[in-house]
Image: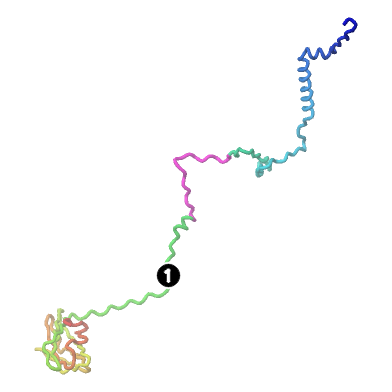
Amino acid sequence: MSGMRRAPRQMPPRSATAVASSPWILVSIGVGAMVVLLVVAVGAYRGPGAEYDPAPPVGAVPLPERASSAGRESSLPSQVVPGLSPRRTDPPSPTGTGPASPKPSPSATQASHPPRPAPPASSAPAPPPVAPAPAPAPLEARYRVTDTFSGGFIAEVLIRNTSRRDRSWSARIEYPGGRVVTAWLEGVPQGTFSGAGGTLTYRSGPDLAAGSAVALRFHIEFASPRPASCNVSGRACDGL
């Protein structure tokens, strides 16, 4: 329309047009802002002063103090980092074919093998030595019954001298409850006898020659043909 007038066109400011047409300007501004922030952070940081005493972290184990030649100095506690085991400080064991067995201590050896107690000393005096019994005379005697009858019997003891010299002898024969009627020697001089209480005791007359024998006979009544005892000069009779 010819009668109408067109409004004049507004132009944007020159500064906004320059920023929009040059993006490197925005990058420069961002870099500058980061530098400024870095400088501010460095200035705000301060190192620990002389009175700074950091507290030990939780789980730290204090180490004992060590003695030195110049005095006693304390070592700082070692920090324990979770997930890591502490470093070993003991020396490694020597290598060998196998683990060495520990030597038993003297006390353990004495406990496993206790010493034997000493036998108690005998305080009782030793009994006196018994004198040996005298050896019986070298005479042999044998008993036998030669004849029996009603109410009694005739018995004999044969005596032999086995030594090399002449010997006297004595005989003792016991018949409990019996009665000795008489006694005699066969073919030699008679001796003496006693028959009290059923016990016959006979002593020889002359000595019995070496290597010879004599028969002592006797009559017994109301007794068993087996005597209770029979011996000649301390030696028991055979044949009983």
Residue drawn at x 48%, y 39% is: 95
Residue where numbered disc 1 is placed? 121
Q: Say which of 31 and 116 sits in front.
A: 31
| Residue 223 sits in quarter | bottom left
Tell me which amino acid carries mark 1. Answer: Ala
Q: Say which of 202 and 197 sits in front.
A: 197
Q: Which secondary structure, mark 1?
A: loop
Q: Which residues are magenta?
A: 88-107
Position of 85 with respect to 45 (left or right) is: left
Query: Considering the image in quadrants, where does the C terminus appear?
Result: bottom left
Q: Residues within 10 Å of mark 1 (few under 14, many from 20)?
A: few
Query: Considering the image in quadrants, where does the N terminus appear?
Result: top right
Q: Position of residue 122 (x, y in %)?
A: 41, 72
Secondary structure that dominates the magenta span: loop
| Residue 48 sits in quarter | top right
Q: Say which of 224 and 71 sits in front.
A: 224
Q: Position of residue 71 (x, y in %)?
A: 68, 42
Q: Is residue 96 magenta?
A: yes
Q: Position of residue 130 (x, y in %)?
A: 31, 78
Vertical order, 239 against 199 (above or below): above
Q: Position of residue 216 (x, y in %)?
A: 14, 88
Q: Is residue 164 magenta?
A: no
* Residue 170 visible in the snapshot: no
